[in-house]
Image (cartoon, helix red, strand yellow):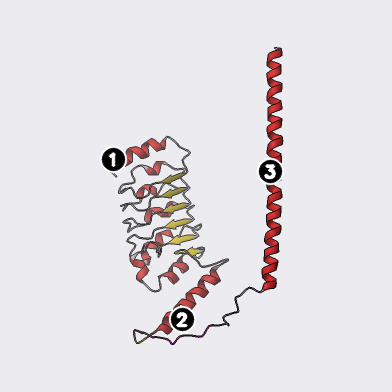
């Protein structure tokens, strides 16, 4: 998108001072122009563009959700003024080191931070450091979700368990850099273990039948109610017409 055209579009939006949500994805934007004048913005999606300079975002103090994934960003310094930021996605940029993240330490409300997105194969050079997750979690103690994985609260134990299992499987699958072939493993249970017994099947069928009976009754009641409403509306319409004729 032409930067001048984009700037004109932003100016046309500024008159809507109550604007709180703005989606500008994959438009080839390279210059944020005067978007900083939209001071009431709370949610902003600028993913998939060619943005390098974030200076225009420094004035967006109400911003709580910001998606800057798949751009050309190397410096996050302007975001330290966005004190209400809770969710930040900068995956797929050029953040080279942990030092580039120190400017965000003052964001006490930041709970979700994404530097890497395996779904879209987005990453940052900083993610090549094997200890970057540990360092980031130490820098931002209030973070609950990092790179899409919950690190504290409900569900975090499951994430950690799955990660440990994956690491164990990978460690046991390779020896001296070669994939180890394992003999075919026996099933954990007998082949008939998962078959539904007749008694259980009969219970399920009976429950299904009762559910269908209740559903049928509900449909009948709905039809009766619709009929009564229709008759009532018709009678009310006739009364209104008779009053008009009387006048």
Q: Residue at coordinates 69% horizontally, 36% vertically from top-left? A: 227
* Residue that mark 1 sits on: 4
* Magenta stretch secondary structure, dominant: loop
Residues packed near mark 2 inside 10 Å, few (<14), some (14 to 19) or many (20 plus): few
Q: Position of residue 89 (x, y in %)?
A: 42, 58
Marking on residue 168: 2
Badge 2 or badge 1: first in the primary sequence? 1
Which circle, 1 or 3, is nearer the viewer? Answer: 3
Instruction: Name the image quarter holding residue 33.
Output: top left
Assign a secondary structure to mark 2: helix
Q: Is residue 193 above or below residue 205?
A: below
Residue 27 visible: yes
Question: Which stretch is magenta?
Answer: 178-188
Task: Sort mark 1 into few (<14), some (14-19) or many (20+) by Cα contacts within 10 Å.
Answer: few
Residue on which the image places disc 3? 222
The x and y percentages for residue 160 are 51, 73
Residue 186 lies, in percent from the top left, at: 51, 85
Q: Quadrant of the C terminus?
A: top right
In whole angstroms, how far apart are the C-alphas of marks 1 and 3?
A: 57 Å
State if disc 1 and disc 2 touch (CB < 8 Å): no
In depth, the one of 123 and 204 nearer the eye is 204
Residue nearer the viewer, 150 or 211: 211
Q: Is the residue 46 above or below the residue 143 in the image?
A: above
Evaluate whether residue 61 shows in this view: no
The answer to which image quadrant residue 192 occupies is bottom right
Q: Report the mark closest to the observer, 2 or 1.
A: 2
34 vs 115: above or below: above
- Earlier sequence position, callout 1 versus callout 3: 1
Answer whether residue 186 is magenta in the image: yes
Horizontal and vertical percent for residue 6? 32, 41
Residue drawn at x 40%, y 41% is 37
**Badge 2 or badge 3: first in the primary sequence:** 2
């Amino acid at each position: 998108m032409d930067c001048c055209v984009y700037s004109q579009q932003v100016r046309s939006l500024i008159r809507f001072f109550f604007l709180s949500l703005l989606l500008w994805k994959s438009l080839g934007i390279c210059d944020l122009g005067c978007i900083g004048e939209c001071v009431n913005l709370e949610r902003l999606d600028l993913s998939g563009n060619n943005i390098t300079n974030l200076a225009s975002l420094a004035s967006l103090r109400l911003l709580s959700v910001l998606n800057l994934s798949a751009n050309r960003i190397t410096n996050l310094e302007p975001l330290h003024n966005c004190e209400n930021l809770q969710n930040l996605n900068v995956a797929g940029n050029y953040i080279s080191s942990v030092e580039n993240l120190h400017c965000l330490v003052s964001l006490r409300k930041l709970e979700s931070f994404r530097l890497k997105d395996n779904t879209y194969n987005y990453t940052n050079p900083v993610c090549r450091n094997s200890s970057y997750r540990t360092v980031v979690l130490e820098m931002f103690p209030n973070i609950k979700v990092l790179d899409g994985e919950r690190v504290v609260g409900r569900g975090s134990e499951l994430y950690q368990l799955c990660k440990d299992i994956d690491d164990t499987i990978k460690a046991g699958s390779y020896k001296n850099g070669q994939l180890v072939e394992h003999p075919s493993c026996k099933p954990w249970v007998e082949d008939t273990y998962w078959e539904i017994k007749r008694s259980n099947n009969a219970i399920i069928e009976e429950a299904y039948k009762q559910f269908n009976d209740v559903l049928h009754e509900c449909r009948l009641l709905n039809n009766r109610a619709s009929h009564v409403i229709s008759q009532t509306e018709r009678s009310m319409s006739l009364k209104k017409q008779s009053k008009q004729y009387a006048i």
